[in-house]
Amino acid sequence: MEKTYSKSGSLKVSENVIVTIVKNAVAEIDGVHKIASKTFSVKSLLQSSSDPSDVRVTMSDGVCKISMSVVAKSGYNVVSVCEQIQDKVKSAVQSMTGVTVSRVDVSVTDVDFTPEETL
């Protein structure tokens, strides 16, 4: 959790808020099919979070590091999509929370080759 002190008290930004901002930012990027799901493990069963997405936020000295795994859509340049994710996520988190983002690590775990339906 991030703590910022002001004249009237302290402000806390939950890591869950940052994860939600990340998900919304990634959803707006063409070329991303979805954020990948966590792999099954005993540890995931014991954790209280019911969120199956693979977005990790690490806070250290008021600075945030974000890591995520995504499934890309076929037909898009994966490097370009990942760069867009990095830029959009960093910008969204910093502008909405004031928390400095030191890095955004993106792993592409799969590519979706399902044909898109046309209307």
Image (cartoon, rainbow, N blue to C red):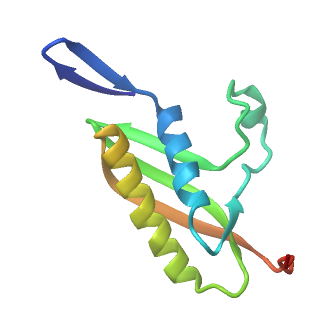
Is 65 positioned to the left or the right of 70 in the image? left
Give the percent coordinates (x, y) of residue 116. 83, 77
Is 106 positioned to the left or the right of 36 in the image? left
Residue at the outermost left position: 7
Give the percent coordinates (x, y) of residue 65. 40, 49
Q: Is residue 64 above or below residue 46?
A: below
- Tally of numbered tags: 0
Q: Quadrant of the C terminus?
A: bottom right
Q: Is residue 71 above or below residue 56?
A: below
Residue at the outermost front position: 119
Residue at (33%, 50%) from the top-left corner? 101
Give the percent coordinates (x, y) of residue 63. 29, 42
Residue at (86%, 81%) from the top-left corner? 115
Q: Relative to the observer, which residue lies in front, 47 or 35? A: 35
Is 40 positioned to the left or the right of 105 in the image? right
Residue at the outermost top position: 8
Residue at (53%, 42%) from the top-left corner? 19
Q: Quadrant of the N terminus?
A: top left
Residue at (52%, 55%) from the top-left corner? 25
Q: Is residue 11 above or below residue 83?
A: above
Is 42 positioned to the left or the right of 79 in the image? right
Q: Relative to the observer, which residue lies in front, 119 or 1? A: 119
Give the percent coordinates (x, y) of residue 72. 68, 73
Q: Is residue 46 above or below residue 84?
A: above
